[in-house]
Structure formats: C-alpha cells, structure tokens
Amino acid sequence: MTKVQCIVTRKMKLNGELYAKGAKIELNAQQYNDLKPTGMVISEADLKAQADAETAEKAKATTATKGKSAS
Amino acid sequence: MSNFSTGAEATFSLAAAAPATFNDTGYAALTFTQVGKLENIGDIPTRVYELVRLQLLESRVTAKQKGSYDLGSQTIRFAIDPDDAGQALVRTAVNSDDSYSIKMNHPELGTIYARALIMGAPATWGSTNDPSMVSLTLEYTPATDTDDGIVAVPVT
C-alpha cells in the first residue's frame, strides 16, 4: 500500500487521534485522496509543488516589473 | 431478565474509494475515516421489498407477492465537531454524486459494509439546551447490477 507523508493544515481528529496543526502524519494513498478535498491535510509533495509554483510566480512577476522599469 | 444490545460503542466510518471486491476482504482493505460524536446510528441497511397486490374478481381475495426491493436509507445523527476529519469527509461527500463505502461496527453485533450515496447532512444549531447536531442521510445502493454490496461480518 502506497504511503503518503502529510502535514496537518489545522487541528484534526482522525479515527480517535488528535493532531495539532503542522503535525506530520503518514496516510495511505487512498485515505489521503479521501481527505485531500477536506483541506485538513496536504502531502509534503503537494506542499513543495505549491511552494515551487509560488516562487516561480513571484520570479515571473519580478522579471515583468524589471522589464517595465527598464523600458 | 433478557439480554439485549444497545447502540453503545457503535461506530460509523466512510471511504470515498470502492473496494476491489465487494466482500469482507475487499472492504477490509480500505482505510475508513470514522465520523465522531455519534448520537444515533439509525437503520441498518437491508432489503425491503415492495408489496405487489392482485385483487381477484372471482374469489375477492387479494393475492400478494414480493416485487422489487430497496436497500433502504439511514439517518445518522452526530454532534458538530469542526475538527473531526470524518465529519469534514461527510461534508465533501454531500457534494459528490459518487457512492461511498460505508462501515458500521458494533462490539457485539458485528460489522456491516455497504455502498451508499451521501444525500445530505443538514446541521441544526439548536437552542441553549440543545447540542448542535447534524442529521446525515444515506441512501443504500447496490454495488453492481447483480450485487447488493452489503456485507455483514459477525463478531467472532
């Protein structure tokens, strides 16, 4: 069974266990796919992809601003 | 004095995924998310047949047969807990047209697995002396055209 390393995005009770915001938990892929739409957990891979996308977006915006001031 | 069971310690869990096979092994391979703070688990799914009547002229008797069957519906009541992952999954499931896998467990009466549509989960905040509750409605639906998908596993 594939396991997914996740970060808890808000306080969460899951199957009797209480997890604080920011806690790291391991879920199997099926349960992660179930819970992902609730926004209570995010996989480390998805979180990194999100951060990379934000960095790329910021870099793009900075380049565009520099281009405008140069012209 | 007669022995009887109550709903004490019964649990209700769900999973968005369908099992690979609609039997004990298939359902048990899923990871279910439990819904917390249950107050009442409601009706357990089972076949309920329609009654077909034929009123015979010559004898005046009404002959009866069983017609189609329905796997039934269930209303589960639980107290609102915004931190409960199972309750969050219920809210997501209400917006889905897909059937969910259901697991109900009772310490004496065993485990029931089934497939159901999550029809609605209206909340009632209540008054000062009422707990704020959700009334979850499920409609049980067959797993396939030929398989009800309801599995009962007794306590061993």
Image (cartoon, rainbow, N blue to C red):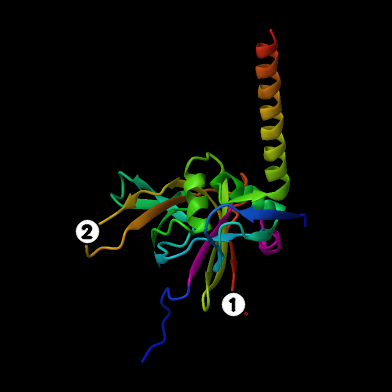
Stretch of the chain drawn in magenta: B10-29
Residue name at image x 69 percent, y 43 percent: A46
Q: Nearer the viewer, residue B61 or B5?
A: B5
Which chain does tag 2 point to?
A: B
Mark 1: which amino acid? Val
Which quadrant of the structure image shows residue A56?
top right
* A57 relative to B47 in the view: left or right: right
Could one spot residue B21 in this view of the protein?
no
Which numbered disc flags the more N-terminal residue, 1 or 2?
2
> From this viewpoint, which residue is outermost toward the top?
A71
Direction left: furthest residue: B128
Q: Is B86 within the magenta?
A: no
Q: Amino acid at mark 2?
A: Ser
Say left or right for B28 vs B115.
right
Q: Nearer the viewer, residue B34 or A16?
A: A16
Q: Where is B123 relative to B5, above or below?
A: above
Percent position of residue B54, x then y: 36, 46
Q: Give the farthest residue toward the front.
A: A70
Residue B88: image tag: none
Q: Secondary structure at mark 1?
A: loop
Quarter in which the C terminus of chain B is drawn: bottom right
Q: Give percent across and percent down for residue A20.
A: 56, 62
A62 left or right of A37 in image: right
What label does residue B127 carry, if any? 2
Q: Secondary structure at mark 2?
A: loop
